[in-house]
């Protein structure tokens, strides 16, 4: 009988372990960048443009984290890079007359390879548009069954926006949204 | 006699352990098949539009209500913009900017800023809005991005205030019973920057019992 009880407990613990954190996972961020990349590829902003269209220079802008989760600079950069430079995007941009340019701070890295950064990052590299990624979240906590607050829900929004650097017009924006729930306290 | 009972007990024990292990593995199996290894774990994810007990019990406004309200405002403004004579009859496309948020609730203003942003995004992506209006990013955000590329901040285009409209929000809360019940009132308006005339308003009421 004792063995049966142990077996049942073991089985149940494997089946019902509630998530203990609402933090971003790699899967969330990868799915967000894939979704936003597909959306950008099908966007009105790129539609109807060809190699002979007036050239656009799309700058890799700032990524801002306003969410309740910690996100390293690298993780934020990954989202922007995977979205704009991921699978097939450079070919697509080429076909639509869009060049992706680095900000001067990143371009300084090129000096390590003997490139004269002053001439490389000249006026011709000035972006006509800038892409920015923003992470934000809505956090809710509550107590289950009258105990101290022990349940949490975070609704995350990962947003990609492309703005005209002169007119401030938003030419593209889309977001990836998901929610995570977790239960239990750290000392449970 | 005890020697003959042992193998049977051992067999039962083995069968039970095997069953337990199979149950354990089957409990985990669904997670593994839906989450291929390189992409990590998506356990704990729920549909953002699904209400949970956490939302109902939280001292803040329900996230689902906020999402639904912002969807409603975006759809309503997109469908009505062509019927606003001042905008539809303008010689050129007007511009829409993000305005202020007045928050009189216990929910952080940043939550309402996200709602305003969602409305903003739905206007950008609307085929109904595009012929009538350009949606603009805030000057300070554009300046920060321009600064990264060493472009003179503060030199972005400026627009005639008579053709500029701002999307503003007011969010109020009536709390009763020591916070057990809250009645929320959400409002978003589109106002002309020069005349201060309100051309569009969308309201939403919700009650939350904790």
Image (cartoon, rainbow, N blue to C red):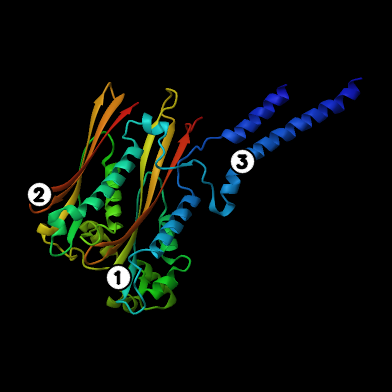
Q: What secondary structure is found at the residue carrying circle 1?
A: loop
In this rendering, would A167 be left or right of B91? right
Closest to the camera, between mark 2 and mark 1, is: 2
Query: Which residue is denoted by mark 1 in the rendering?
Result: A127
Q: CA distance from mark 3 to mark 2?
A: 59 Å
User: Above or below — where is B96 with respect to B29?
Assistant: below
Which one is in front, A48 or A104? A48
Closest to the camera, between mark 3 and mark 2, is: 2
Q: Residues within 10 Å of mark 1 (few under 14, many from 20)?
A: many
Q: What secondary structure is found at the residue carrying circle 3?
A: helix
Where is residue B117 drawn, in percent x and y? 28, 50
Q: Disc 3: which chain?
A: B
Residue B196 is marked as 2
The picture quadrant where one finds residue A119 is: bottom left
Q: Is residue A160 visible?
A: no
Q: Are marks 3 and 1 on the same chain?
A: no
Q: Are marks 2 and 1 on the same chain?
A: no
Q: Is residue A13 visible?
A: yes
In this rendering, would B121 be left or right of A18? left
Query: Which residue is denoted by mark 3 in the rendering?
Result: B28
Q: Residues within 10 Å of mark 3 (few under 14, many from 20)?
A: some
Where is residue A177 drawn, in percent x and y? 40, 48
Q: CA distance from mark 2 to mark 1?
A: 35 Å
Pointers 2 and 1 in contact (C-beta within 8 Å) = no
- Name, please, the residue furthest toward the right: B1
Where is residue A19 drawn, in percent x and y? 51, 38
Residue at x 31%, y 35% (from the top left corner):
B61
Q: Disc 2: which chain?
A: B
Q: Disc 1: which chain?
A: A
Which one is in front, B120 or B129? B129
Q: Are marks 3 and 2 on the same chain?
A: yes
């Amino acid at each position: 009988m004792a063995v049966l009880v142990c077996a049942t407990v073991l089985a149940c613990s494997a089946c019902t372990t509630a998530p203990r954190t609402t933090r971003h996972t790699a899967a969330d961020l990868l799915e967000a960048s894939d979704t936003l990349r597909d959306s950008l590829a099908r966007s009105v902003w790129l539609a109807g443009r060809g190699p002979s269209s007036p050239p656009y220079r799309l700058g890799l802008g700032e990524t801002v984290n306003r969410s309740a989760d910690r996100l390293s600079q690298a993780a934020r950069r990954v989202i922007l890079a995977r979205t704009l430079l991921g699978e097939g995007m450079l070919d697509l941009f080429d076909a639509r007359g869009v060049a992706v340019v680095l900000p001067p701070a990143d371009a300084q890295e090129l000096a390590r390879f003997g490139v004269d950064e002053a001439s490389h990052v000249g006026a011709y590299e000035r972006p006509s548009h800038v892409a920015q990624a923003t992470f934000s979240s809505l956090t809710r906590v509550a107590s289950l069954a009258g105990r101290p607050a022990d349940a949490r829900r975070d609704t995350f929004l990962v947003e990609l926006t492309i703005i005209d650097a002169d007119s401030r017009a938003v030419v593209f924006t889309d977001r990836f949204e998901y929610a995570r729930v977790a239960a239990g306290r750290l000392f449970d | 006699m005890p020697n003959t009972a042992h193998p049977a007990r051992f067999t039962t024990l083995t069968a039970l352990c095997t069953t337990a292990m199979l149950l354990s593995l089957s409990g985990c199996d669904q997670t593994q098949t839906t989450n291929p290894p390189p992409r990590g774990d998506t356990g704990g994810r729920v549909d953002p539009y699904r209400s949970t007990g956490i939302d109902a019990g939280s001292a803040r406004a329900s996230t689902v209500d906020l999402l639904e309200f912002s969807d409603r405002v975006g759809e309503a403004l997109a469908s009505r913009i062509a019927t606003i004579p001042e905008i539809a009859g303008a010689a050129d496309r007007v511009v829409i900017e993000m305005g202020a948020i007045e928050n009189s609730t216990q929910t952080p203003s940043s939550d309402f800023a996200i709602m305003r942003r969602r409305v903003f995004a739905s206007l950008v992506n609307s085929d109904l809005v595009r012929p009538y209006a350009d949606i603009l990013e805030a000057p300070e955000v554009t300046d920060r991005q321009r600064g990264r590329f060493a472009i003179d901040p503060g030199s972005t285009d400026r627009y005639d205030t008579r053709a500029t409209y701002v999307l503003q929000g007011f969010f109020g809360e009536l709390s009763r019973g020591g916070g057990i019940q809250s009645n929320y009132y959400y409002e978003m308006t589109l106002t002309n920057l020069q005349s201060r005339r309100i051309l569009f308003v969308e309201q939403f009421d919700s009650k939350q019992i904790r």
